[in-house]
Image: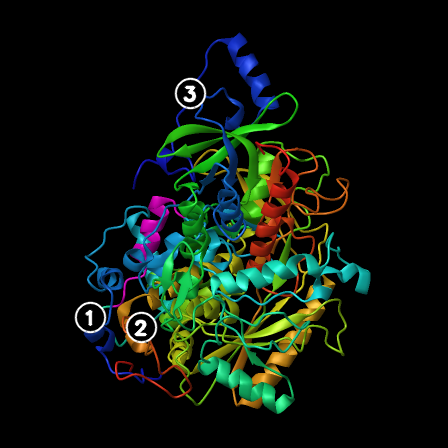
Amino acid sequence: MSESPYPSGSVRALLATDLVTSATRAALEARLHAPPYTPQFFEQDTYELLRAVAARLLPQPERPAPIELAPALDQRLLAGTSDGWRYDALPPDREAFRLGLGGIRQSAQALFQREFEQLSPEQQDAVLQAVQQGTAPGEIWQTVPAARFFEELLAELTETYYAHPLAQEEIGYAGMADVPGWTKIGLNEKEDREI
Amino acid sequence: MPDEEALEEGVLSPVETEVQDPLLKSILADNAAQAPTELEKPLEIPAPADEVDCVVIGTGAGGAPLLARLAMAGLKVVALEAGPWHDPKKDFATDEKAQEFLFWNDERLSAGHDPIAFGKNNSGTGVGGSTLHYTAYTPRPQPADLHLRRDFGVGQDWPFGYEELEPYFEELEQFLGISGPTPYPWGPARKKGYPLAPLPLNGAAQLMQRGCEKLGIRTSPAANAALSARYYQEGVGWREACTNRGFCQAGCSTGAKASMDVTFLPLAAKHGADIRPGSYVTEIERDQTGRITGVVYTQNGQQVRQRCRHLFLCAGAIETPRLLLLNELALNSGHVGRNFMAHPGVQVFGTFEEAVRPYKGIPGALISEDTHRPKDADFAGGYLLQSIGVMPVTFAGEVARGRGLWGQPLRDYMRQYNHVAGINILGDCLPHEANFLELAEEKDARGLPKPRIHFTSQPNELRMSAHAEALMRRIWEAAGATDIWSFPRNAHIIGTARMGLSGDDAVVDANGRAFDVPNLYICDNSVFPSALSVNPALTIMALSLRTADKFLGQHATTTHP
């Protein structure tokens, strides 16, 4: 496991400056200071399963508290909003996520005879890999295409993760600090405010 | 968890009073069988407003230029835009998630072997339409793009030649303030060069230039509708130069990018056009002879009727055919919703030792059109090559979908984000009977059927993409990349109400007028008979000006068009 090549705190420092517009700051700080969240769409145990899955898809062992990825999905499904399209092969999002998470539960039982949350990290990864490859056992996967569901779940959680200021610090992104514009845009060129 | 009933996907008011009377029940059932949509129930709508000369549905690249043209000719025109009117300087954040309101996010169902991504990939909403999030890449098509059938025996030819569009390309380049190279290295010689010098090259463009040079492929700074210097815009005033924010695909906050809201729409408004945001059209009304008499739209939850003498439908290649199908309008040719095309747009990414920081500069800074008709092609048509900058959230989503990385490998790969550069193609696509739009049984929040779009890449697209991917991998290897991978994708949406010479196999004639309806014009990417091997925005705008001129010419002899 590699470390981030960038220093911690860079984006947070930029947010305190007038290099960031107020609209941009508002968007990023809302994620940075997100209050504790209680699920409103998922049942509590399904929500905990989702958190356990997210912890394997985007593991964050180095963080004292992980960036929470489940709240954004729960809120979106509650609101019934969409990103403009879905695979016709999948049922509507609310149903797809309930069924898909249920499918992960079934696969864990079929492969290891235990709840997903009780499996070792290696066993959890084996379940998720089987879902990604479309080979996962379980009745639900007879009607829900496992690989498509996995792609949707992974893409949504990944986009939520990299929209977070701490994740953007980790990858050295400084694009939010664009009030003065950029003049040093070529190879190996950077402004003082870039990391 | 909330009540299960209230959670039904896409239903706002799921509870309907049950009808008890058996006779009424059977009458309603009969009516429902004949008129399956909400649309045909009698509407209680405020008294008709005054009739206007023209209503334009949509304010993107198809609707905005003609709106300005018609207003400047002295006509009374109304534009209906489904989305809101933004103040980019104040409202637009430099944050991909926060900007998702720019995309047409009503759900579409993507079917076929290669389902198309909509939303941020190609569909916009708001005053300015998809130009609010287009990349500003504005190459002209080449003349041969308009006659693929003549040259290769496949696809469909345009009902006119390049010379019909050329004066409009020139006008647009000057009006919008397009930044580009003069002379342009490909295509026929031009009367006028671009009004502004090209935008500076970012890291990805420099790397593509390096790789192409080693392989003997010509490159050039690309034509982009973003200002490399301050520019005076008629009807608007001074627009300031691009600050290299790199954020074109999620909204320009400086006005440097020539989206319609900072160019044609203010010009139209200055000449009296009435632009109504938040106006979602549901019904197109006709008289007994089939002439359109007006439209019904929803604004702030109220239904409003606007009567008009002529209707211009400019809602894009999904919503335009959807409106036609919902209203059973202009369907005689059987081609509404058919001939759906989407540009092959495979992307190839590589990791470089140098820092690229791909979030800076105009995303598509460099172009090559040496692949317009490759000598070793085993396919019809061709493609262009484009360097690409990419924002972190978009890139992360592609890594997840395209590479299938997750867990620690995903996080490790993303830590190289600042060293990643991409190239993509934009290639021609042939119409095929397997690729079409239809209305699904599933309803949206308004109770209207969602569109389902079938798309499967056919052998010509597959061979072209394979050729392009191999070439882009060689370019990246020559430029020094490691860990090269490709992300297959299809971009723009085209062709669902095509233009042609005969009402037997086309929806509109060469002037953009519907064969079936005398006072209906369609102008957006749905009328393209073929996909062209360039990004469509400039050609849509050219068609828009031409459609307005043809319309004005036809009605010049009457006092009231």
Number of numbered discs = 3
Q: Position of residue B511 (x, y in %)?
A: 67, 45
| Residue hosting label 2 | A168
| Residue hosting label 1 | A18
Which chain does tag 1 point to?
A
Q: Position of residue B498 (x, y in %)?
A: 68, 47
In the picture, the disc for residue B47 is: 3
State the CA–CA distance, disc 1 to disc 2.
18 Å
**Residue B533 drawn in magenta:** no
Query: What residue appears at the point 42 percent right and 86 percent down from the top-left corner?
Result: A187
Magenta segment, principal secondary structure?
A: helix
Q: Are callouts 1 and 3 both on one chain?
A: no
Colour scheme = rainbow
Name the residue type under label 2.
Answer: Gln
Query: Quadrant location of the C terminus of chain B?
Result: top right
Q: Quadrant of residue B189?
A: bottom right
Which chain does tag 3 point to?
B
State the CA–CA distance, disc 3 to disc 2.
54 Å
Helix, strand, or loop for circle 3? loop
Q: Position of residue B404 (x, y in %)?
A: 49, 69
State the residue lying farthest toward the left: A16
Please give the range of residues in magenta.
A66-81
Tell me, yes or no, if residue A48 can be seen here: no
Name the residue type under label 1.
Answer: Asp
Helix, strand, or loop for circle 2? helix
